[in-house]
Amino acid sequence: MSEAPRAGILVTGTEVLTGRVRDRNGPWLADRLLEAGVDLAQIAIVGDRPQDLLATLESMASEGLDVVLTSGGLGPTADDLTAEVVGSFQGREMVLDEALEGRIAEILRPLAARYPDIDRDAIAHGNRKQATIPRGATVLEPVGTAPGLVVAPAEGREGPTVVVLPGPPRELQPMWKQAVATEAWRSAIADARVYRVEMLRLFGIPESEIAETLRHAEREGVDLSALEITTCLRSGEIEIVTRYEPEAQSAYDQFARIVATRHADTLYSTDGTTIDAQVAALLRGERLEATVTSSDRPAAGEPDGLVGAVHTIAVAESCTGGLLLARLTDPPGASEYVLGGVVAYSNEAKIAQVGVPRETLETHGAVSEQVAQALAEGARTRLGAELGVGLTGIAGPGGGSEQKPVGLVWLCVSAADGASLTRSVRLPGGRPDVRERSALIAMHMIRRLLSGERDDVKRRAV
Amino acid sequence: MSEAPRAGILVTGTEVLTGRVRDRNGPWLADRLLEAGVDLAQIAIVGDRPQDLLATLESMASEGLDVVLTSGGLGPTADDLTAEVVGSFQGREMVLDEALEGRIAEILRPLAARYPDIDRDAIAHGNRKQATIPRGATVLEPVGTAPGLVVAPAEGREGPTVVVLPGPPRELQPMWKQAVATEAWRSAIADARVYRVEMLRLFGIPESEIAETLRHAEREGVDLSALEITTCLRSGEIEIVTRYEPEAQSAYDQFARIVATRHADTLYSTDGTTIDAQVAALLRGERLEATVTSSDRPAAGEPDGLVGAVHTIAVAESCTGGLLLARLTDPPGASEYVLGGVVAYSNEAKIAQVGVPRETLETHGAVSEQVAQALAEGARTRLGAELGVGLTGIAGPGGGSEQKPVGLVWLCVSAADGASLTRSVRLPGGRPDVRERSALIAMHMIRRLLSGERDDVKRRAV
């Protein structure tokens, strides 16, 4: 394997540096570089001062990086200086590209028409500034009004090729496709191998189990040296990201099969789809991709009866205070299957809004198996939904007791046909952790019920 | 004003570099540096490779930075290399601090007792590794198990002082206080001036109005050159952050008074408190700090009758799907005043769960003034709350029409005493923007009603 090309990402903008605006471009570009077979050496965030920008470019050059991606600083005003600084860094003078000036003017025309009072001189000046680029640079057509650039070092000079991209993610992301299609980019990363990147997601096991599975795979003779495996624990879920060259496909397949066999009950995604996307698809009546690629084991299937029809859902949640409903209604088109729900914070709301019997609350307390089940049933029947979810717990910091400590949560998902799942958990962490994690567990329980899993009747009769 | 000391922040960790974990330390430390009067030149994110860490330290040194703050890489395992790399960078050999080794062992003792099967040799080895530090470094006592360090260049060498901090924010943040109290830190930033930092928050005006206010302040003779003013538009709110030396207090007071006078109806926070914190305080019955520091103008007051008593609240929301309730229930203790609410996504849910008259829905449509008011009234009366909030709109991408386009939202906040506010807005952006912004507007309407603002009766009778 020849050494992979190395890249730096340079994010500009005082608002990002000072933390007022969160950088979304660095992580997104990091994923693109991973796919492109380019190693990412560092992400640097600098303010709008040209000397800081230039110093960072020079230090990235001195580390021998092959490409640098910049984001931001391409606007029409005088303090947007990235193109000029990159031109000077590459030893290329700035020249007006008149054809580009005309194309930007076309983009601006409807804007100017909408605001008759706008300062036309300022517009024309900004237009010209955005069309002034380093001589010989490859232009990436504007998605907003700012063109991007791919700028190689001037002839006779050495150093990284710089890809200059706009700051707004909705402009940067489409422009990236143009950038990687340019001759200038391809020759800068000529040595790059093409990699495949796959992601497995698991829910409900500790990260140490994965370490044990890796040792097991090695003992089974899987060539792990051909796989770059990164495991990451993120809010209770484990992501296993594997990058490998196409020749290592069979090693990856063996590895994925071992994970699927050893963790059949916790592996829920083999194609990187999130739990939220899976729940939305199942509620829309779509069939999930087979969970497991191995032919040794049938896909953890949805009973065919559930596929093809929309499943309506309603929620009665307490300690999550609306987080579960907000999550379920996040995807476009959620109104097809989410009928609604109740945030029943007080006992009176549980009684009046969901029909939880007062006696159940008094006998078992608000955080109990019985109340979770009554919430699920009440949500389902009152809103006329096929599925109901009930969630009640103690998010803290107050409200805990010895029997019912902060972090105790009861959840129930039940269906019109009598199938149901009821669980309790004791979650660690502070109030936001308990709330987030509870909503996540509910999502996984909805997925499991829709995938055919259910408590046996004895369990329900308890 | 002598030139301020300059700093770099160096965040380590492959998970952060690849975007699997979001960096929270960079923005937090950026704010601390702002307060300490230290200019932040750049934030660099690198993986766990020691050569990348060292190269970045060297490039920061070559840019003449006075201090570098690092986060991460202080764990007990062999791939946690920050202390060693910093030692080598500063020309200081690594030595075992036996007293520190003993203190870390004390911290680990209860852990080892809880897990009898734990590998004691591995623990002892990790303990020794964490107690091995650059000779002459100042130790920052562990918050978790990892000590931090302040490491100046070895005698006879030049370059930045490096403050080595752990990666987990819950360890880094308390340790920062220790770091700034050390002699080594103080002498590294000896030239730093102490600054004051103030934040004003406004809601509901375009950023260009602030630019005009700055010009006005200049014409009025306010010495803006003594104030470093940054304005930032963040999801519909404007933050004005001003940094100044104590001598410029009167310039800042004049500036703040001009903002308060010109933007009396949109300035809602003069002490940096967020709308969520203000709404929580008002619902708990607390008095807000006067909104305006100037004596020219009475504080936008809460009627005294509203202060001192808890105000209960209930919500019926449609297109926000639970976001408003999730936001209201976020603060600890929210169960004191949030009784609950309904996410009434379908028309049937609006009728059955909130009591919106079917006729109102049929006559005016689900997204209308009348339905927003019926939702607020229904939430209030059904849950027995003092305040009710109703919110109905079209979040998109589907569901819009010519009369009622995507982004149209009707909101109503009403109180048991008959006071109410009803508003409609047409929000730009995609589904997540419309949902987030609608919830934000509702928060501001709750604040306004609790601060004594109300529509006149004629408005309500429409």
Image (tube, coloured by chain):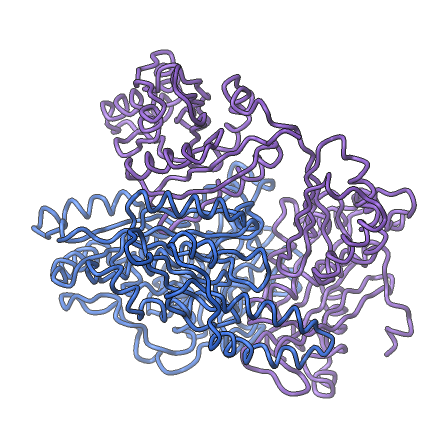
Chain colours: A blue, B purple
* Residue A404 visible within the image: no
* Residue A355 left/right relative to B297: left
In the displayed structure, would residue B218 be above or below residue B177? below
Q: How many marks?
A: 0
* Residue A346 left/right relative to A394: right
| Residue B190, quarter of the rendered image | top right
**Where in the figure is residue B382, as x and y percent of width and height?**
72, 66
Quadrant where the C terminus of chain A lies? bottom left
* Residue B418 visible within the image: yes
In the displayed structure, would residue A28 be above or below residue B346? above
Which residue is found at the position 25% from the left and 31% from the top?
A: B78
**Relative depth, front residue between A37 and B300:** A37
**Where in the figure is residue A94, as x and y percent of width and height?**
46, 61
**Where in the figure is residue A116, as x and y percent of width and height?**
72, 79
**Where in the figure is residue A142, as x and y percent of width and height?**
47, 72
| Residue A262, quarter of the rendered image | bottom left
Which residue is found at the position 30% from the left and 63% from the top?
A: A269
In the displayed structure, would residue A286 be above or below residue A434? below
**Relative depth, front residue between A123 and A433:** A123
Which residue is found at the position 59% from the left and 54% from the top?
A: A361
**Relative depth, front residue between B147 and B232:** B232
**Relative depth, front residue between B338 and B322:** B322
Which residue is found at the position 35% from the left and 55% from the top?
A: A30
* Residue A400 left/right relative to B408: left
| Residue B153, quarter of the rendered image | top left
